[in-house]
């Protein structure tokens, strides 16, 4: 597994692994695929965390100016 792969590449491999695990594979092969999938999930989560940190929400002020602020799910309603 390449740690430099994109989120989309990692997700695609993860989906492929799920399909393989749903098929007829040996226990040893299932464990190998499962271990790789765990690493892919971790990579996807890292990529999503990085993207979330980069998201900025534009907030219009009362005077009409626009400021940006960090994206915060806790304050979203």
Image (tube, helix red, strand yellow):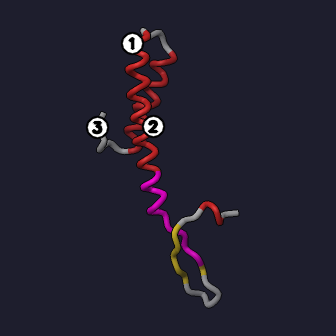
Q: Please state which of residues 32 and 7 is positioned toward the viewer in this rendering.
A: 32
Horizontal side, residue 66 vs residue 34: left or right: right
Reading the image, the residue beneath label 3 is 2
Q: Nearer the viewer, residue 3 or 59?
A: 3
- Magenta-colored stretch includes residue 28: no
Q: Secondary structure at mark 2?
A: helix
Q: Which residue is mark 1?
A: 28
1 vs 3, front mark: 1
- Residue plotted at (40% across, 31% down): 13
Pinpoint residue 39: horizontal percent, then vertical percent. Answer: 39, 34
How far apart are the two marked residues, 3 and 2, measured between alpha carbons?
A: 13 Å
Real-space CA distance between mark 1 and mark 3, rounded to the nearest whole angstrom: 22 Å
* Residue range corresponding to the magenta coloring: 49-59
Residue at image point 47% right, 30% down: 15
Please give the residue where the numbered disc 2 appears in the rendered image. 41
Q: Which mark is residue 45?
A: none
* Camera-side residue of 41 and 7: 41
Q: Residues within 10 Å of mark 3 (few under 14, many from 20)?
A: few
Horizontal side of 55 relative to 4 (left or right) equals right
Placement of 15 over or under 70, stated as above or below: above
Vertical placement of residue 17 versus 66, above or below: above
Please say if 72 is above or below 68.
Answer: above
Q: Give me the C-alpha separation between circle 2 and circle 1.
A: 20 Å
Q: How many marks?
A: 3
Query: 10 Å neighbourhood of mark 1: few (<14), some, or many (≥20)?
Result: few
Kindly identify the residue that appears in the image at 53 percent across and 80 percent down: 67
Question: Does the CB distance between marks 3 and 2 fall below 8 Å?
Answer: no
């Amino acid at each position: 597994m390449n740690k430099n792969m994109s989120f989309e590449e990692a997700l695609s491999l993860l989906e492929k692994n799920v399909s393989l695990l749903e098929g007829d594979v040996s226990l040893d092969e299932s464990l190998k695929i499962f271990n790789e999938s765990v690493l892919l999930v971790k990579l996807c989560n890292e990529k999503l965390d990085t993207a979330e940190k980069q998201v900025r929400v534009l907030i219009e002020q009362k005077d009409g100016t626009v400021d940006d602020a960090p994206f915060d799910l806790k304050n979203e309603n």
